[in-house]
Image: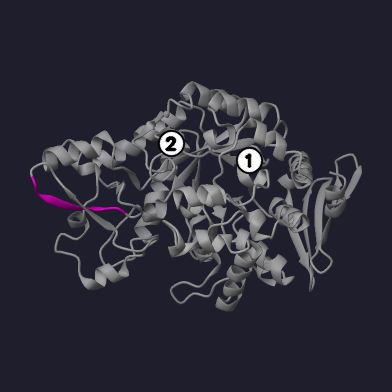
């Protein structure tokens, strides 16, 4: 995998077209910016109840986007990340429909997880209370079978997303079939979506329990045997990321986005530096994704201290709501239809009050922090909160899932902040120093992040009091390049 910035995008929402058009966009307008691309779910259908994360057929490309050959063509020139949706599949899938029709006589009965498979003696109040919930309400949904009987199926996220029994032969075969399809289609990085919820055990939280780690271990080894790298997608206490990073190829640094916001809001980098001292080095860094800004990742959990105090988190949340003029408040928690109540739905650009220099400082920290940086398509183009889409769908996360087309991309790339960001991306991609050793130094309101590989050096010094950053690059021939973030923006 290339040590370069990657793009996160829905195929259709950035192009208003398909995979061929995305390849053209990467090769033309976005040329030289990205070494890889995370293709958000492109399986059939892309417009289900959870924007593709509820596949009816996980091994079929939605025909509106193209086919697997189109995926391969992107893989000829770019690293490709794709989602292996580990925990569930659509209630509209042929397999689940067959279960509804034939009940326990269905060939697919063992593919799905029912309540009584985990709790054969019944669900006690203690068991119910122990289960970790990413959303309000029950984690079970009752379905009526063709013979008139009813069955309670696990539905961790929504009623339309039926949990898979990953311990069953049918469940293992299903996941193996998806892995094989990825292997044949030049997908080389697999995002294990919702892997922390896949294992259920009575008397536990059913989230990131020891058996979950063992399951992720086995799945990662299977992918590795096929030459693919695995990325675990888990929102949890920051020490969970540290622990699971020892057992998979890569993890997300989900603590970084809220910590950078806290640092810029408070001009205090203590919490950020504390995290960077211990953060996994085998990570993908993000500021924004198709989901919201995670708060759980910096907060306390089960008696463990968080990276931020509860007062600091409250201040962080209120500042985001204020900077977005209340738009994030309309999209977050019970204010809209949300799967995840532990996230704030808002573009990162709006979370910073559309302050261009603050936004560049945030991206610079991301690019100089350990890990492979990914930039979400809306963040790349500094697209503001999409209130029209939110008001139309009433889905909180849609505030940061805009529908664009090539013309809108071209227009957005003329914004000074976007021009400056693309220059910052090119600086990150061009220096071999980022293949070397990371060091850090901080004072009361300044932070320096540095990389050294042989003669090549790269450093970022941030002055939070005076709101600017200075980048110094030294190549292998000893040529020095200096650029300030404010000047980068002024010259854009």
Percent x, y of residue 196: 40, 55
- Please indicate, yes or no, whether residue 361 appears anywhere in the rendered image: yes
**Quadrant location of the N terminus in the rendered image:** top right
Residue 478 highlighted magenta (yes or no): no
Locate residue 111: give its quadrant.
top left
Q: Which residue is mark 2?
A: 46
Q: Which residue is located at x 67 percent, y 27 percent?
A: 27
Q: In the image, 64: left or right of 429? A: left
Q: Earlier in the sequence, mark 1 or mark 2?
A: 1
Q: Which residue is located at x 71 percent, y 36 percent?
A: 411
Residue 150 highlighted magenta (yes or no): yes
Percent x, y of residue 42: 46, 34
Q: Residues within 10 Å of mark 2 (few under 14, many from 20)?
A: many
Separation (CA) of disc 1 from disc 2:
21 Å
Locate residue 36: give its quadrant.
top right
Q: Which residue is located at x 8 percent, y 43 percent?
A: 147
Q: Tell me where the magenta segment starts and ends, as one range.
A: 148-155
Report how many numbered discs are placed on residues in the image. 2
Q: Is residue 387 depicted above or below 403 in this figure?
A: below
Q: Which residue is mark 1?
A: 6
The circle on residue 164 is: none
Percent x, y of residue 82: 49, 38
Q: In the image, 408: left or right of 416? A: left
- Main SS of the magenta part reads strand
As helix, strand or loop, the secondary structure at mark 2 comes to loop
- Please indicate, yes or no, whether residue 250 appears anywhere in the rendered image: no
Q: Give whichever of 39, 228 is nearer the camera.
A: 39
Percent x, y of residue 403: 56, 39
């Amino acid at each position: 995998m290339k040590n370069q910035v990657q793009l996160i995008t829905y195929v259709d929402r950035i192009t208003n077209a398909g995979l061929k058009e995305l390849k053209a966009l990467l090769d033309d307008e976005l040329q030289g910016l990205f070494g890889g691309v995370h293709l958000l779910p492109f399986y059939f259908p892309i417009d289900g109840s959870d924007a593709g994360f509820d596949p009816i057929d996980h091994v079929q490309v939605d025909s509106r986007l193209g086919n697997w050959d189109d995926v391969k063509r992107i893989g000829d020139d770019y690293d490709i990340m794709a989602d292996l949706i580990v925990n569930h599949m659509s209630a509209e899938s042929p397999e689940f429909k067959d279960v509804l029709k034939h009940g326990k006589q269905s060939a697919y009965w063992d593919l799905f997880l029912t309540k009584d498979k985990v709790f054969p003696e019944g669900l006690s109040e203690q068991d119910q209370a122990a289960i970790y919930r990413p959303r309000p309400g029950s984690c079970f949904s009752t379905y009526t079978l063709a013979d008139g009987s009813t069955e309670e199926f696990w539905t961790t996220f929504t009623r339309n997303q039926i949990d898979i029994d990953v311990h069953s032969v049918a469940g293992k075969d299903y996941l193996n079939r998806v892995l094989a399809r990825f292997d044949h289609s030049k997908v080389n990085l697999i995002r294990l979506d919702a892997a922390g919820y896949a294992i259920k055990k009575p008397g536990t939280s059913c989230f990131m329990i020891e058996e979950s780690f063992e399951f992720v271990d086995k799945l990662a080894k299977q992918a590795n045997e096929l030459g693919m790298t695995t990325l675990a997608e888990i929102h949890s206490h920051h020490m969970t990321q540290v622990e699971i990073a020892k057992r998979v190829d890569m993890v997300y640094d989900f603590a970084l986005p809220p910590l950078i916001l806290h640092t810029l809001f408070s001009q205090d980098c203590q919490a950020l530096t504390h995290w960077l001292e211990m953060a996994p080095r085998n990570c993908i860094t993000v500021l924004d994704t198709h989901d919201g800004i995670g708060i759980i990742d910096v907060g306390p959990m089960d008696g463990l201290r968080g990276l931020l105090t509860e007062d600091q988190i409250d201040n962080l949340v209120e500042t985001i709501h204020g900077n977005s003029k209340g738009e994030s408040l309309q999209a977050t928690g019970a204010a809209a239809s949300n799967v995840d109540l532990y996230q704030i739905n808002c573009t990162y650009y709006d979370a910073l009050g559309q302050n261009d220099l603050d936004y560049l400082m945030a991206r610079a920290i991301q690019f100089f922090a350990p890990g492979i940086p990914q930039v979400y398509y809306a963040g790349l183009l500094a697209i503001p909160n999409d209130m029209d889409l939110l008001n139309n769908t009433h889905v909180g996360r849609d505030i940061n899932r805009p529908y664009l087309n090539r013309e809108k991309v071209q227009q957005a790339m003329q914004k000074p902040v976007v021009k400056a960001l693309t220059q910052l991306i090119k600086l990150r991609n061009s220096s071999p120093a980022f293949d070397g050793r990371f060091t850090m130094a901080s004072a009361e309101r300044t932070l320096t992040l540095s990389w050294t590989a042989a003669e090549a050096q790269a450093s970022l010094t941030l002055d939070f009091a005076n709101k600017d950053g200075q980048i110094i690059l030294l190549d292998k021939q000893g040529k020095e390049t200096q650029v300030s973030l404010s000047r980068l923006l002024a010259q854009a």
